Amino acid sequence: MPVHDAARRMFAFIQDEGTEDAPLRLMENLAADPDLSDLVQIARRIRETLNRGAARESLLRVLFDTATDLAAITDYEKVLRTIVRRTRVLLGTDMAYISLNDYESGETYMRTTDGVITDAYRGIRMPLGTGVLGRVAAGNASAQTADYLTDPAIVRHHGIDDIVDQEGVKSLLGAPLRSGGNLMGALLVGNRYRHRFSAEEVSTVESIASLASVALNNARHLQEMHNLLSQHDATRQMLDDQVQQLEHISTHERLLTECVVAPNPLDELVSVLQTELGLAIAVLDASETKIAGDLIPSTPPVPHTEAFVATVANRSLGRIVTAGQLSEAQRRLVSRSALVLSVILLMEESRFHADQRQQSELLELLVSPTRSDSAGALRRSAKFGIRAGSQAHVSVLEVGDAELDQVLPLVRHLLGESSGIASLKDQLVVVVSGAFDGSQIHKALHQRGVRATVGFASRALDEELLASAYDAARATLDVLLALDLTNSAVHHDQLGIAGMLFRYSPAGFGSELVDAILGPLRQYDATRGTSLTETAWRYLSNDRHHDATAQDLHIHPSTVRQRVSRISQLLGSGWDAGYRKLDIQIALQMWKLRQHIQRNP
């Protein structure tokens, strides 16, 4: 064959990128010619070099496209997922994954995987320097194995071989992830069959690892910058919120300060809170009595009810009760309002004590037997609605187990500022009023759960003042207590004969009457330790009903009959009927009254 024709065919073979049979057979024929065999070898090498260049160009184009795609991704997690997915597709492997180094523990751990089946494999943590993963992550060069489980060159780590066997991994290839001279981790690919990776595959993994390192570093910096910007925005928003809260608190504090000096501070305080919260509010005093607000406290409380106590020196003065769900900021505002409530209640308490001293002094002038300053007392009483010539009611209250310091404010609240005076005298509450008599006061206290026994009397206020009315009211109270008429209110004029006898009889009359009529009974009780006198009192009080008397005395009805029979023997038959019944009832009332006075001198 002519040389120029052979040269033309060799150039055609070099330029042909395909694998057609004709050019290959032609080159085999040319190689048989001794004069052309060297030229054929050169042509083949040139063709292989060109093919490798084309493949490299294709790979570079793919890597360029990958780098472009990775550069466009700013989400760190998405970058990781894209790297392992692209790597696995480019190399056609069964799996690909990235590990990151934890230098505090001296390990590298699986961060993102693609194609991995078992959770155990995804959770691998390899000490740096062990296995293919640990060796690549700890060094500066790529590494591979064609069969992991049988490769004697691998430094084993306890338990890893079992995990690799469960996953079915055979061949592995990895390249380190480096950023600025620092090892971040490793990029690995793997197959579930034996395979020796070619130099091109190694180069491809190393190239992708280089791109991945840059992309991960950029994504990490962008993420950090984004986090810093988010923190900055959050901090600025927090500062703006705090400024608004401070302005809000400042406005609230100003309104609360104005409440203290308002004509009706409690109503003003409730108005401020209702405007702020949009909820029902109640203000209670230390005795749990509502003194302001529209919320009706209940037992048990309604859902979402909250209470804020106003205290001074560990002493509770009252509390604010809200109905509804409160935010933390609202709770802080109501808590500050509770402090203002403490100030308001302390001021009212101070005014109360000052007013109490004034009323106590005036009460002593009005009910005292001395008339040294009747003109001054008449002038001062007009301030409280009690004027000369008008009808005045003097009530004396015994409140049982209730605390006097708690009952007195209730009575003062009932009277208001210009309807009377109330004070303590001899451990009793004494009320002088032109508008409220004893029965009205008793009813008001009863509605608040206070058991009170009230004796009261009435008379016109003049220069003689109210000493006689006070004496009559006090005597009425003594009679009520002596006759066991507790938790009741009785005017002096309602006491009847017993009351009149006690009030107006001469000294010793009561004792004489009792001894004359009840002497046999009292002597029998004194010598034998019985209670026939008490039985007679209960028997007549129960209209001579044996069963009711037995229940009253907590004894059996037959015992009552025996006692009544004994009384008839001592006092004579007919003692419980006719005019004798009246005499004996009066004597028994006087006996009960004297007993009470002796016990409470």
Image (cartoon, rainbow, N blue to C red):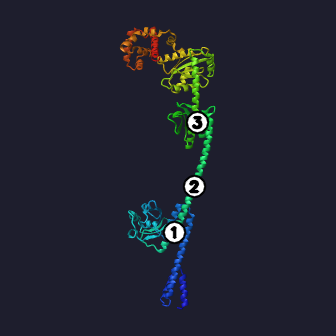
Label 2 residue SS = helix
Seen in the picture, residue 544 relative to 254 is either above or below; the reply is above
Q: CA distance from mark 1 to mark 2?
A: 32 Å
- Where is residue 298 drawn, in percent x and y? 52, 34
Going by the picture, which residue comes out furthest to the bottom?
2
Disc 3: CA contacts within 10 A as few (<14), some (14-19) or many (>=20):
many
Q: Which residue is mark 1?
A: 208
- Whichever of callouts 1 and 3 sits on the residue coming sooner in the sequence is 1
Which residue is label 2 attached to?
Answer: 230
Residue pointed to by mark 3: 340
Q: Amino acid at mark 3?
A: Val
Q: Residue at x 58, y 27 (%)?
A: 352
Kind of residue sitting beneath label 2: Ser
Q: On the picture, is 270 further left or further right than 563? A: right
- Residue 472 in the image: above or below residue 273: above
Residue 137, image x and y in percent?
Answer: 46, 66
Provide the secondary structure element on which disc 3 rests: helix
Q: Amino acid at mark 1?
A: Ile
